[in-house]
Amino acid sequence: MDMTIEDYLAQGGKLTSPANVPPRYRGELLRLMATFVDSELAGSAGFADTINDAPGIKSRIAAARIVLEKADHAERVLNVMAEFGANTDRYEGVHPWAARLNRDADIGASRQGGDMRLSVFHYPLQGWIDAVVMNVLQGAAAVIQLREFARVSYQPLAEVFRTVAPREARHYELGREGLQQIVATGSGREKARASVAYWIPRVEAGFGPAKSTRFETLSRFGLRHRTNADLLADWQAETGRILAQLDLT
């Protein structure tokens, strides 16, 4: 008896081309890729506005590097999307990637504005300290989520994620270095604490509900391996450790 593609994936099988990909698998894979691409572009556009707020040359270089590399990461995944016949023309036009809601908006994890960015990228940054705090908290989330994405069953995409993961880890490291400099002064630490309190629930929302109705399907397809709750717990442990070290809890 021949094994179906769904059974093959459920048993840990890998796919290497769009040919014969089940329709539901294709839909979920494209959703995953679009969320990543749109989040990287929105993150890059939002952080670009803070380059001129950087307090020194090294900080400017670090911010510019993050802006450049996030856009590059988006393009790499977009190339995989194109192989599935996705309409990539919308990324060649002008889209308000830098658009943000009001600072006090509360949208939870819901999508806004016609793209698939994570909800955290709908909130505005307020100055350099706020941008660095957000970069640290979301950077830690990106490292954890990319560790999960690097295991997806579609191998060309998994390879892209494995390539970009070290650079996203470096963004997180740059953020931590910047935050250490900020908390060296009393006023910097107090401002950073306020930003930590603001960003924590908004970054947490990006992990999705603890009990996802789609997780079983994604797991069966090999597109997810660990639950939202597990990934969130890793993030809470990592950021809790960093914030405690910097006296920002």
Image: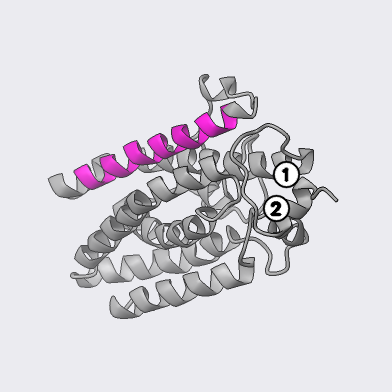
**Helix, strand or loop for disc 2:** helix
At 72% from the left and 52% from the top, the residue drawn is 8
In contact (CB < 8 Å): disc 2 and disc 1: yes
Q: Quadrant of residue 20?
A: top right
Q: Is residue 203 magenta?
A: no
At 73% from the left and 63% from the top, the residue drawn is 212
| Residue that label 2 marks | 9
Which portion, as a residue range, is magenta? 61-82
Q: Amino acid at mark 1?
A: Tyr
Position of the C terminus by quadrant: bottom left
Q: Is residue 98 visible?
A: no
Q: Residue 83: x, y in percent?
A: 59, 27
Describe residue 99's horizontal placement relative to residue 139 as left or right. Answer: right
At 28% from the left and 70% from the top, the residue drawn is 189
**Helix, strand or loop for disc 1:** helix
Q: Residue 185: x, y in percent?
A: 19, 69
Describe residue 131's horizontal placement relative to residue 223 as left or right. Answer: left
- Comparing 159 with 172, the one in front is 159
| Residue that label 1 marks | 25
Describe residue 246's horizontal placement relative to residue 112 as left or right. Answer: left
